[in-house]
Amino acid sequence: MVAIIYGSSTLNTEYVSQRLAAAFGAERADLHNVKEVSPSIIAERSSLVFVTSTWGTGDLQDDWEAFFPQISEMPFQGKTVGLVGVGDQENYPDTFCDSIAILFDTVTRHGGRIVGTTDTDGYTFKTSRAVRDGRFMGLVIDEDNQADQTDERIRRWVKQVSRDLS
């Protein structure tokens, strides 16, 4: 079972996470708010999806920021992780979805495997630390400016990562 762990300040990320869980299906994924989750969920699961928004100058969402010390040195060997960033490319074009880069670096530094990179086409940001080798290091959603594309982006991404996150 895939553990989807999200942090949300404005409910956009929570709403995206609920839709993501529905796309996986109740028999394949369960949803956890990071402010209530135990690090043991991460330790016990081999398939994870981390969902966060970006705040300030590229920071993790507040609940993720508070939880981060508990996972920053956690071993991720044998774990497959998908990342989802929720951001606003028009108002924050220089830090668009930067926070998933923090999670990417932590997971990969500690032996985890990231799945689900996505194309940057269709977005109008200037720069993002979440881009490596010309691709986002996960699914990127802009509910503020491209909400009409969210369901299709989620559907395509879940289809892409389903075999890896089983």
Image (cartoon, grey):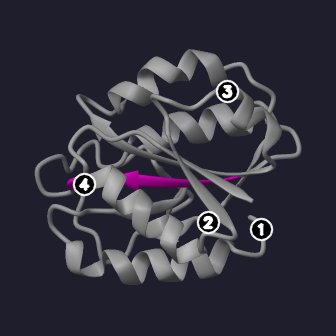
Q: Which numbered disc flags the more N-terminal residue, 1 or 2? A: 2
- Magenta run includes residue 32: no
- The kind of residue on which mark 2 rests is Gly
Q: Position of residue 127 (x, y in %)?
A: 31, 50
The percent position of residue 22, horizontal first and vertical second, equals: 50, 72
The residue under label 4 is: 126
Q: Residue at x 71, y 19 (%)?
A: 73
- Do the CB atoms of the residues marked 2 and 3 lie less than 8 Å apart? no
Residue 28: horizontal and vertical position, in percent?
A: 69, 68
What distance separates the C-alpha of mark 1 from that of mark 4? 31 Å
Residue 10, placed above or below residue 19: above
Question: In screen coordinates, is 136 left or right of 140?
Answer: right
Residue reaching furthest right?
A: 78
Q: Amino acid at mark 4?
A: Lys
Could you tell me which secondary element the residue under label 2 belongs to? Answer: loop
Query: Between tags 4 and 2, which lies in front?
Result: 2
Q: Between disc 4 and disc 2, whose residue precedes?
A: 2
Q: Earlier in the sequence, mark 3 or mark 1?
A: 3
The reply to whether callout 3 and callout 1 are in contact (CB within 8 Å) is no
Mark 1 is surrounded, within 10 Å at the Cα level, by few (under 14), some (14 to 19) or many (20 or more) other residues, namely: some
Quarter holding the N terminus is bottom right
Magenta stretch: give its range.
81-88
Label 4 or label 3, whichever lies nearer to me, is 3
CA–CA distance in space, label 3 to label 1: 22 Å
Q: Of 74 and 111, which appears nearest the observer?
A: 74
Q: Secondary structure at mark 4?
A: loop
**Which mark is in front, 1 or 2?**
1
Q: Which residue is mark 2?
A: 116
1 or 4: mark nearer the eye: 1
